[in-house]
Amino acid sequence: MKARSLSSVFRPCRAWVAGIALLSLASCVTTPITGRSAWNSFSPAEDVQLGAEAYEEQLKGAKLVTSGAQKEMVERVMKRISAVTDAPGFQWEVRLIDEPKTVNAFCMPGGKMAVYTGILPVAQTETGLAVVMGHEIAHAVARHGTERVSQEMLLQTGLGLALQNAKESTQALALVGKELLVSLPWGRMQESEADHIGLMYMARAGYDPREAVEFWKRMGALGGSGTPQFLSTHPSDETRASQLKKLMPKALAEYEKATGKAAAPPTKGVAPGTGGGK
Ligand SMILES: [Zn+2]
């Protein structure tokens, strides 16, 4: 986490808490792994509730994969990564949605996740899948969804009032929050933080973190005129690769601790298909 990002987030956080009559609803929370201070007007239990409701709505009419090796792989990655996260009380669950043309995955606040079959060819291996699932799980653990909703509500006076009134009507909060949860894009800081946290989680779960650089390269290569949905909300640039490389020694140390063995020397990065997934 860069110092600049930390301070730019922390300053408004303090200002809001000090200056706005929503004090009783607001709290500064510390993000796992990066240690960033974030302002969030929701409790972790509300993340679980809001996320679960939004999840059910998102899955309405979705064609689910109900058996087979791909479904088992997706569930295995979820089990391994969720076991090493810092999110007590989350209700982890993952569904695989049969949409070969949708290159996407998401994890709702509170831990309910969906992976689209269209991202599996880009993931290539279980380790590649762990990159994208680790990243999405990191968004949930860092509580980016309700952080964005909290910020948006304060920026819009009407919604700020709705938030205040929500003390009496948590239902109103839930309605507005759910709407925003699925419509707000991630900020650049949140993307960078999800990369950071996701990298450490996949390594802790025993997946070779070096595959993250390769995975995002493959995602980037899908750009151009046919930019997939996934990249429209997940901007990919060179700073992403350079941040991941900077974090790699620490991630490799986590990986070696988790697996009890030294990471195999990379021949040329980590060749697709030879990642450390078990
Ligand atoms: Zn993201």
Image (cartoon, rainbow, N blue to C red):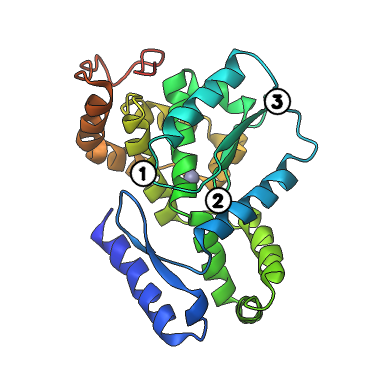
Cα separation, mark 2 vs mark 3, equals 22 Å
Side of 130 where 229 appears, left or right: right
Looking at marks 1 and 3 on the same chain, the residue that comes earlier in the sequence is marked by: 3
* Residue receiving disc 2: 109
Of the 4 image quadrants, the one containing the C terminus is top left
Side of 157 where 213 appears, left or right: left
**Quarter of the rendering containing residue 227:** top right
Side of 271 where 168 appears, left or right: right
Q: Residue at x 36, y 67 (%)?
A: 9
Q: Amino acid at mark 3?
A: Asp
Q: Residue at x 50, y 31 (%)?
A: 78
Looking at marks 1 and 2 on the same chain, the residue that comes earlier in the sequence is marked by: 2
Q: In the rendered view, would you say 156 is above or below 236? A: below
Q: Is mark 1 within 8 Å of ligand 1?
A: no
Q: Is mark 3 within 8 Å of ligand 1?
A: no
Cα separation, mark 1 vs mark 2, equals 15 Å
Q: Residues within 10 Å of mark 1 (few under 14, many from 20)?
A: many
Side of 175 where 41 appears, left or right: left
Q: Nearer the viewer, residue 239 or 123?
A: 123
Single out the mark in the foreground, 1 or 2: 2
Q: Position of residue 184 (x, y in %)?
A: 59, 58
Q: Residue at x 33, y 25 (%)?
A: 206
Residue 259, visible in the rendered structure? yes
Q: In the rendered view, would you say 158 is above or below 106? A: below
Q: Amino acid at mark 1?
A: Ile
Q: Position of residue 58 (x, y in %)?
A: 71, 44
* Residue receiving disc 1: 197
Cα separation, mark 1 vs mark 3, equals 28 Å
